[in-house]
Image: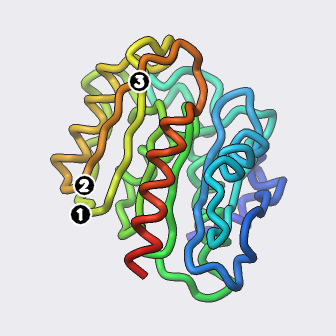
């Protein structure tokens, strides 16, 4: 198998992820946080600052052209290829970077994203479930048309935090719930919060939920 960093045509591997927070070598836990469409790592850097957790190392991957894939989440996945495959490879590379310095196990990594980034987080966890310390899907869903999304593989008790607004214009609440229920069926320990925000953003309440996910993982060390 080709290693993600050996894919010469993958534009999302052209730029190294932004590192923030505690040094990777020393942190008891790392969080890989994935930004949305028409955004960059600075959005997740702001989230990291709002979390105010000094013991966490953050790995923030960057999409080429500030978008991970060109079409919408509800289009056939084939319509978004090869961009989805490129994006998932870039997220795998970010996870590998989070693990490398101190041979960090997966149960010391929280994996999360917002909007387009949340869709990719859900998709990667569904396709390749692993024992992460926690997974956060902030306004996101599995990819593909309604009823044609991937059925997640067994996640066996992985804590997952979902957050969505009933007024969001990009990811309808029903679709976010459907994805959450798919992961519940797959064995996730799931928390789902619904907000009334009319802005498509990472709200303070979503940050609070992500903080709970991370601090719970820190307490389990």
Other-residue count near label 3 (Cα within 10 Å), few / some / many at <14 / 14–19 / ≥20: some
Q: Sequence-wise, which precedes: disc 2 or disc 1?
A: 1
Which residue corresponds to mark 2? 188
Distance between the alpha carbons at the discs numbered 1 and 3 = 25 Å
The secondary element bearing badge 3 is classed as strand
The answer to whether 5 is drawn above or below residue 168 in the figure is below
Q: Say which residue label 1 marks.
A: 157
Q: Nearer the viewer, residue 170 or 213?
A: 213
Question: Quick check: 163 left or right of 6?
Answer: left
Residue 116 location, x and y as percent?
57, 33
Left/right of residue 126 with respect to residue 14 in the rendered view: left
Q: Nearer the viewer, residue 154 or 49?
A: 49
Q: The N terminus appears in which quarter of the rendering?
A: bottom right
Q: Position of residue 103 (x, y in %)?
A: 58, 87
Task: Judge whether residue 108 can be spotted in this image.
Answer: yes
The residue depicted at 67 percent of the width and 52 percent of the height is 48
Closer to the camera: disc 3 or disc 2? 3
Q: Earlier in the sequence, mark 1 or mark 3?
A: 1
Q: Residue 179 location, x and y as percent?
A: 30, 35
Separation (CA) of disc 3 from disc 2: 21 Å
As drawn, 24 above or below 191: below
Asked if labels 2 and 3 touch by Cβ distance under 8 angstroms, the answer is no
- Distance of label 2 from label 1 (alpha carbons): 5 Å
For image coordinates 76% across by 62% down, the residue present is 20
Q: Residue at x 73, y 65 (%)?
A: 21
Q: How is the image coloured?
A: rainbow
Q: Quadrant of the C terminus?
A: bottom left
Q: Are marks 2 and 1 in contact (CB under 8 Å)?
A: yes
Q: Could you say which disc has been placed on residue 195 in the image?
A: 3
Neighbour tally class for label 1: few under 14, some 14-19, many 20 plus, Cα within 10 Å: some
Residue 168 versus residue 32 in the image, above or below: above
């Amino acid at each position: 198998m080709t290693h993600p960093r050996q894919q010469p045509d993958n534009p999302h591997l052209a730029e190294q992820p932004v590192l923030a927070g505690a040094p990777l070598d020393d942190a008891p836990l790392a969080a890989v946080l994935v930004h949305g469409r028409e955004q960059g790592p600075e959005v997740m850097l702001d989230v990291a600052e709002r979390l105010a957790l000094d013991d966490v190392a953050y790995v923030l991957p960057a999409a080429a052209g500030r978008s991970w894939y060109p079409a919408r989440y509800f289009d056939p996945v084939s319509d978004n290829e090869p961009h989805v495959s490129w994006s998932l490879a870039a997220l795998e590379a970010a996870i590998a970077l989070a693990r490398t310095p101190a041979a960090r196990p997966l149960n010391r990594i929280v994996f999360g994203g917002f909007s387009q980034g949340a869709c990719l987080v859900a998709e990667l966890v569904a396709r390749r479930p692993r024992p992460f310390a926690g997974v956060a899907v902030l306004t996101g869903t599995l990819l593909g048309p309604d009823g044609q999304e991937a059925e997640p593989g067994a996640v066996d008790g992985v804590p997952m935090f979902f957050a969505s607004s009933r007024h969001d214009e990009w990811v309808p609440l029903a679709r976010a719930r459907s994805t959450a229920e798919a992961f519940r069926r797959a064995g996730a320990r799931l928390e789902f919060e619904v907000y009334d925000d009319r802005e498509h953003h990472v709200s303070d309440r979503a940050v609070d939920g992500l903080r709970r996910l991370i601090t719970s993982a820190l307490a389990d060390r």
